[in-house]
């Protein structure tokens, strides 16, 4: 594996270089094909890695340095790879979704003048994300953590001439800065505590109990702030909905399936640290469940198809975090895995809808699209059912595991809140389907002629739809003990406290308890779907949405305005910062610039005077040498 | 009578032999076929240099070889500088060929002189005997005078060469005088023997030794262009053909620094407490003068000449922190010299490229270069940022390690001063970048084809950026060369 693992990230990097440097001269499809070939190479090799890891029995992770980058005293950092089962599964997610998004983008970006830029950034992101999951030390992780952030920034602001897009890019970057600042501090503290940044020694020593618990708690909390920023967890979630300004394939790849799950990956990767800091795990669980609820409730009333999905992503990431928080690492990664496929499917489906109706994203001006774009309708419905948690689709198995474990472990409050969130989830996604595809068209059918998308777009949709159906069945049965568990167990098996060790005791399977919980979860999902169906398809008078919105005007307005988080941040942070900036600018312009200009003028005058010493006469030059020598002699003789 | 030859180990000399043979072959070829078309002479020279480079790389791993009765030593130190010098020579051939062709200047003569100078430089850094060292310095200097005046129809070239020659002779005399004093006092020309003599500060002959030391520092200070022995530099650098300036500002400086470091740390290590402060003084005035006078220059070539003086100052800072127990300062100088090859030759190379296009080297000529030749403008920007010490270029690490040397030696104030002066230097480097990218083009440029030039510039560019990432092997080699961790 050592011989070829480096090709996996290298291939997209090469594609990036080709498309970035020469893309202007290639045709749009040429850049796309280069991107697709590179990611295809990565995917094939990732599958190879997966089979090899599967065959290896899971005991030993491959860990080696490709190159020692910095060696300064004790501070040694290499560029290296760490390949275990967790990395292998992440490789599969990243390369497969990336490939499908690349193919889809041929149709979606067709004719866009910036096409070559798009097909340069997309492989660059893929490269960065692959390096992120393959890193074998925290500094490398940090570097590529920033790199995916940069790609995200570039792609959100892809249509930079639109003010909303460049604003959204800036917002995403700044909000992530907050989290990354904490992450950076965490990395520094890790080095100060352990004297190294490599994964293996840190994870080994974290479990031995020699490091003070308070230090570990602080480190893990700081690392977690990074996760909160990247994975859009409350209170750093506000950038993700705005990030929908980017092209939709980008939203699918970066802001649904891969980059935003980097925070989940970080916690799972650093699980020995988190296990040694139970306080942090509680924080993770609380943040996760709060975010799951906030995201799901805001999603209930939004009218923009992509924003509903963005809040859905936030909410689902919250599910993953509270799974991590209760120690159910495997279930969190399982949900990450299934979510990547069905959420990418939903986003690409939304893109297909927008493509068909001329860029419209407001669901109030859609409706009745089912007959115009049947393939999009059916695939999107499959994705929605998977998200809603209807058996036997993928989302059901992974979400049910998380909720079931919360219940079994005795976290009843978390279980209850999570179940509530999944009820809301079923509701808003059914509402989305109903408003978009069912009922009568609410747009001017003379002006807009919806049409089905080309095959380059629908084929990836169908592939993702199939994956959304089968991944749960293939990996998640029996619950809490499916193949995914036996596969990932070695990654998380070293520790003794709570979580998986406890999980191993009750061993999962089809026990009466799990069957009861599964039935409950199914009932909750169906209830949510049924309610939305009655409200938006059957339009029961008793359940008219507008009447209800009027009756619960306070709640409705709060949800519609996303709990006013943007306004609160604006008042508390943005405006004071701007005032401070203005003040500093005035200080800078008058005091600092004055001083600097004074110095510059002084230097310039001196410079002019010294230049006159360069007379051009050889005799003067020789004299200068002589005077210099005498000066040195005098200095050494008298000092 | 029985003649006893000193033991000669030719293994140590293979690179030099390769170069000398190439130079002689060139001369013979000229006689037989005086006007060959194409880049034949350049390729022949490159072949010779490449062979020398390979032979040097083979030497890099092996144990030090001392030969010629202890007057020559091929050790890591010599190998390191030989690599720097060969790299500069190879780049110089790439940069020069198109200029020579376009100006119809004798290529074979040029390359012969260049190779001889290279041999002199390698001799200077391999010498462990002060007479061999002097021989090397002269063998390096005379070809450099010739190259400076190589554009023989241009007045500035002649003027620069004449000034350089007169002052060079003057400084050589001072250096030789210093070496003679050292021999007179210690009774030996061998560096190790001198070192043993001065180990305890020199005893009664201390004043005489210090006199010798100062004369040597003055003589070599001239060669590295340290203030106040720098006066020749702006005139010679500006007058010389730009491709020659590129070569001598890098290779000549590296060789002179190699000789200076070798002499000070191997012949006079016991006096580091005396020469250290002298170098501190020289470094401060050199940094200040070089970087400040550069600000008011309108000719970028002359600005780079002053900037070269400023870089001498930065390197002297590193050397001044050396002491037998803390050798990192010398390593920082070696490291600096290595990285400097790519950045400085690249910067001068772009100017030469412009001149070949019929452009000039003043700021006006560079206006709006971005819109006419984006690749050239971007490359020059990268080289200048490298010289500035900007992150993402190898230049960053040069400043970082000099600073680290000052911090380790307790001269932190000097390191801070260096960083402040680097910030001042940003003024004139960035001004060029601004003129290239944000001004409207004033002058048109022609476009002759310059294939070898482009290769040379690409190598310099890759070196400047690539070594930002891959700097560790260079640093480790430099540390080994000055005896750290040995």
Image (cartoon, rainbow, N blue to C red):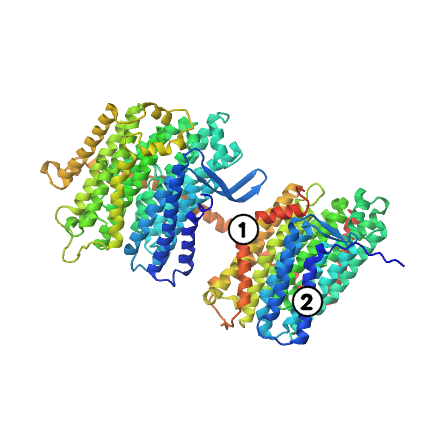
Label 1 chain ID: B
Q: Is residue A471 left or right of residue B244?
A: left
Q: What is the C-alpha distance between the residues marked 1 and 2?
A: 35 Å
In the depicted structure, whether residue B19 falls above or below residue A565: below
Residue at the spot 18% in from the left edge and 51% down from the top edge: A373
Label 2 chain ID: B
Image disc number at residue A51: none
> Could you tell me if residue B230 is visible in this image?
no
Q: Which quadrant would the N terminus of chain A be assigned to in this image?
A: top left
Label 1 belongs to which residue?
Answer: B468
Residue at the spot 83% in from the left edge and 54% down from the top edge: B181
In the depicted structure, whether residue A346 falls above or below residue A519: below
Which of pointers 1 and 2 indicates the residue nearer the eye? Answer: 2
Image coordinates of residue B443 in percent, x first then y, are 50, 71
Secondary structure under tag 2 reads helix
- Seen from the viewer's position, the closer of residues B149 and A590 is B149
Residue at the spot 36% in from the left edge and 30% down from the top edge: A325
Count the labels in the image.
2
Name the residue furthest left: A541
Mark 1 neighbour class, 10 Å CA radius: few under 14, some 14 to 19, many 20 or more: many
Name the residue furthest right: B1
Label 2 belongs to which residue?
Answer: B23
Marked residue nearer the N-terminal end (1 or 2): 2
Discs 1 and 2 lie in a common subunit: yes
Q: Is residue B419 left or right of residue A333?
A: right
Image coordinates of residue B383 in percent, x first then y, are 55, 58
- Seen from the viewer's position, the closer of residues B143 and A596 is B143
- Dots 1, 2 in contact, CB < 8 A: no
Image coordinates of residue B100 in percent, x first then y, are 60, 71
């Amino acid at each position: 594996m050592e011989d070829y693992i480096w090709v996996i990230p290298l291939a997209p990097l090469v594609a990036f270089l080709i498309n970035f440097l020469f893309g202007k001269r290639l045709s749009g499809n040429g850049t796309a094909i280069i991107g697709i070939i590179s990611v295809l190479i990565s995917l094939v090799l990732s599958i190879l890695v997966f089979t090899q890891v599967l065959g290896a029995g899971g005991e030993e992770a491959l860990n080696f340095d490709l190159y020692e980058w910095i060696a300064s005293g004790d501070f040694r950092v290499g560029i290296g790879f760490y390949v275990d089962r967790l990395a292998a599964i992440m490789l599969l997610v990243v390369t497969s979704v990336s490939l499908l998004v690349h193919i889809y983008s041929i149709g979606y970006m067709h004719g866009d003048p910036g096409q070559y830029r798009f097909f340069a950034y997309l492989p660059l992101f893929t490269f960065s994300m692959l390096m992120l999951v393959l890193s074998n030390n925290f500094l490398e992780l940090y570097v590529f953590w920033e790199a995916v952030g940069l790609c995200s920034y570039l792609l959100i602001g892809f249509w930079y001439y639109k003010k909303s897009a460049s604003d959204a890019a800036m917002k995403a970057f700044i909000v992530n800065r907050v989290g990354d600042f904490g992450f950076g501090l965490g990395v520094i503290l890790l080095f100060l505590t352990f004297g190294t940044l490599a994964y293996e020694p840190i994870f080994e020593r974290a479990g031995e109990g020699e490091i003070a618990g308070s230090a570990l708690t602080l480190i893990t909390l700081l690392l977690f702030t990074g996760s909160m920023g990247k994975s859009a967890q409350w209170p750093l979630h506000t950038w993700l909905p705005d990030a929908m300004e980017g092209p939709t394939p980008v939203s699918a790849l970066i802001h649904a399936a891969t980059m935003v799950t980097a925070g989940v990956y970080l916690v799972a990767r650093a699980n020995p640290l988190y296990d040694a800091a139970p306080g942090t795990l509680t924080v993770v669980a609380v943040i996760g469940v709060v975010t799951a609820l906030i995201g799901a409730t805001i999603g209930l009333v939004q009218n923009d198809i992509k924003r509903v999905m963005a809040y859905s992503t936030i909410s689902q990431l919250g599910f993953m975090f509270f799974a991590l928080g209760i120690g159910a690492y495997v279930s969190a990664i399982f949900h990450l895995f299934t979510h990547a496929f069905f959420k990418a499917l939903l986003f690409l489906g939304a893109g297909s809808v927008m493509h068909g109706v001329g860029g419209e994203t407001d669901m109030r001006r859609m409706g009745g699209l089912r007959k115009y774009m049947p393939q999009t309708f059916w695939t999107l419905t499959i994705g929605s059912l998977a998200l809603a948690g209807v058996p036997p689709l993928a989302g059901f198995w992974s979400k049910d595991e998380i909720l079931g474990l919360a219940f079994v472990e005795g976290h009843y409050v978390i279980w209850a809140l999570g179940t509530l969130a999944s009820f809301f989830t079923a509701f808003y996604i059914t509402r989305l389907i109903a408003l978009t595809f069912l009922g009568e068209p609410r747009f001017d059918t003379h002006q807009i002629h919806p049409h089905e998308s080309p095959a380059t777009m629908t084929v990836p949709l169908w592939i993702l739809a199939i994956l959304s159906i089968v991944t749960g069945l293939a990996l998640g049965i029996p619950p809490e003990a499916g193949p995914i568990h036996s596969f990932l167990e070695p990654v998380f098996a070293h520790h003794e406290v709570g979580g998986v060790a406890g999980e191993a005791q009750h061993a999962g399977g089809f026990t009466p308890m799990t069957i009861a919980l599964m039935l409950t979860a199914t009932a909750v999902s169906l209830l949510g779907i049924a309610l939305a169906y009655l409200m938006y398809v059957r339009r029961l008078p008793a359940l008219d949405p507008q009447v209800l919105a009027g009756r619960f005007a306070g709640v409705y307005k709060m949800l519609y305005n996303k709990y006013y988080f943007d306004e609160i941040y604006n008042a508390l942070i943005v405006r004071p910062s701007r005032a401070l900036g203005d003040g500093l600018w005035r200080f800078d312009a008058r005091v600092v610039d004055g001083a600097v200009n004074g110095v510059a003028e002084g230097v310039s005058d001196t410079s002019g005077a010294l230049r006159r010493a360069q007379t051009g006469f050889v005799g003067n030059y020789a004299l200068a040498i002589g005077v210099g020598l005498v000066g040195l002699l005098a200095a050494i003789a008298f000092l | 009578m029985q003649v006893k030859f000193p033991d000669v180990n030719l293994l140590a000399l293979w690179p030099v032999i390769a170069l000398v043979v190439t130079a002689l072959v060139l001369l013979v070829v000229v006689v037989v076929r005086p006007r060959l078309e194409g880049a034949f002479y350049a390729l022949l020279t490159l072949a010779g240099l490449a062979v020398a480079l390979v032979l040097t790389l083979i030497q890099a791993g092996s144990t030090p070889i001392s030969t010629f009765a202890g007057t020559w030593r091929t050790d890591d130190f010599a190998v390191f500088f030989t690599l720097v010098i060969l790299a500069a020579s190879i780049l110089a051939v790439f940069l020069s060929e198109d200029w020579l062709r376009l100006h119809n200047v004798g290529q074979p003569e040029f390359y012969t002189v260049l190779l001889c100078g290279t041999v002199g430089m390698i001799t200077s850094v391999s010498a462990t005997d002060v007479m061999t060292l002097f021989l090397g310095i002269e063998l390096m200097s005379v070809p450099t005078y010739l190259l400076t005046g190589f554009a023989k129809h241009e007045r500035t070239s002649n003027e620069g060469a004449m000034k350089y020659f007169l002052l060079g002779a003057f400084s050589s005399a001072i250096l030789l005088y210093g070496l003679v004093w050292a021999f007179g006092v210690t009774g030996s020309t061998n560096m190790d023997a001198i070192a043993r003599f001065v180990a305890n500060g020199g005893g009664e002959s201390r004043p005489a030794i210090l006199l010798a030391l100062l004369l040597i520092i003055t003589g070599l200070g001239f060669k590295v262009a340290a203030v106040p022995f720098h006066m020749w530099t702006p005139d010679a650098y500006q007058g010389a053909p730009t491709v020659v300036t590129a070569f001598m500002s890098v290779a000549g400086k590296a060789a002179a620094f190699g000789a200076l470091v070798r002499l000070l740390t191997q012949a006079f290590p016991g006096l580091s407490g005396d020469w250290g402060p002298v170098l501190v003084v020289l470094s401060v005035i050199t940094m200040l003068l070089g970087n400040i006078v550069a600000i008011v220059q309108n000719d970028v070539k002359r600005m780079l000449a002053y900037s070269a003086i400023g870089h001498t100052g930065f390197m002297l800072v590193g050397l001044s922190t050396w002491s037998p127990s803390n050798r990192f300062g010398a390593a920082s100088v070696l490291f600096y010299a290595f990285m400097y090859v790519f950045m400085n030759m690249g910067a001068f190379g772009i100017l030469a490229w412009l001149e070949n296009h019929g452009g000039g080297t003043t700021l006006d000529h560079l206006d709006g270069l971005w819109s006419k030749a984006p690749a050239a403008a971007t490359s020059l920007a990268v080289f200048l940022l490298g010289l500035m010490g900007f992150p993402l270029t190898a230049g960053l690490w040069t400043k970082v390690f000099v600073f680290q040397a000052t911090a380790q030696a307790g001269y932190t104030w000097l390191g801070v001063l260096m960083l402040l002066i680097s910030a001042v230097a940003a003024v004139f480097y960035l001004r060029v970048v601004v003129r290239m990218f944000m001004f409207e083009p004033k002058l048109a440029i022609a476009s002759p084809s310059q294939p070898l030039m482009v290769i040379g510039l690409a190598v310099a560019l890759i070196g400047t950026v690539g070594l930002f990432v891959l700097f560790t092997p260079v640093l480790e080699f430099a540390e080994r060369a000055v005896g750290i961790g040995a």
